[in-house]
Image (cartoon, rainbow, N blue to C red):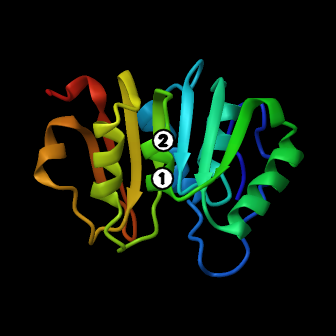
Amino acid sequence: MRIITGKFKKANLFAVPGKTARPTTDYIKEVIFSVISSCSGKKILDLYAGSGSLGFEALSRNAVFVDFVDFSDKSIKTMKRNIEKLKCTSDCKIHRKKVNAYLNSCEKKFDLIFMDPPYNKDLVNTTIDKIVDNELLTENGYIVIEHSPREKLIEKWDVMTTYNKNYGSSVITVLANENLQT
């Protein structure tokens, strides 16, 4: 697992040990960052962060700040190791919380929210609901979701969907706040 481009280009990241985490492949990461195009100047939220690879890639591409959210001790330790390795302590913060608890208490707005929840646990739609209900996206913000092909987004998110493509064992879906009609 490595950083693809930017100021941390080619840095190898530590992966969460064990078989519970499913790291985002370099190929999927390239797809995600080609779809969203720019992270420059953006505030990022990385939910179900795991090793933090999506957030660190965004920092490498000039995001201004990343908030990482995960509850797993292994994930927290791995992110801390990656922060030390990249020397980016002042550019991010780790929140050791369950995602729903974090979203319910969060008072920030984000330009870009990554979510890569555990597959087939029915977390995708409920997490999007919390993000939208709590108005955590900026006016032109995006949600980038990596999810199982078996987990379908409910119809009400169709109006926000700007990208949806199956890559075998993963689907990448991008939702744009600019398309949301409330």
Task: Please indicate whether residue 123 sits to the left or right of residue 79 in the image.
Answer: left
Instruction: Assess disc 2: are there few (<14), some (14-19) or many (≥20) residues with their C-alpha within 10 Å of its C-alpha.
Output: few
| Disc 2 residue type (three-letter) | Ser
User: Residue 11, which numbered label?
Assistant: none
The residue positioned 68% from the left and 37% from the top of the image is: 5
The residue positioned 63% from the left and 35% from the top of the image is: 66
Task: Please indicate whether residue 66 sits to the left or right of residue 170 in the image.
Answer: right
Instruction: Assess disc 1: are there few (<14), some (14-19) or many (≥20) residues with their C-alpha within 10 Å of its C-alpha.
Output: few
Q: CA distance from mark 2 to mark 1?
A: 6 Å
Residue under label 1, please give it: 101
- Whole-percent x, y for residue 153 in the image: 22, 56
Q: From the viewer's perspective, is residue 18 above or below residue 141?
A: below
Q: Residue farthest to the left?
A: 155
Check disc 2 and report its element: helix, strand or loop: helix
Depth check: give the residue in front, 105 or 78: 105
- Whole-percent x, y for residue 44 in the image: 55, 33
The residue positioned 49% from the left and 30% from the top of the image is: 107
Residue under label 2, please give it: 105
The quadrant of the image that shows the N terminus is bottom right
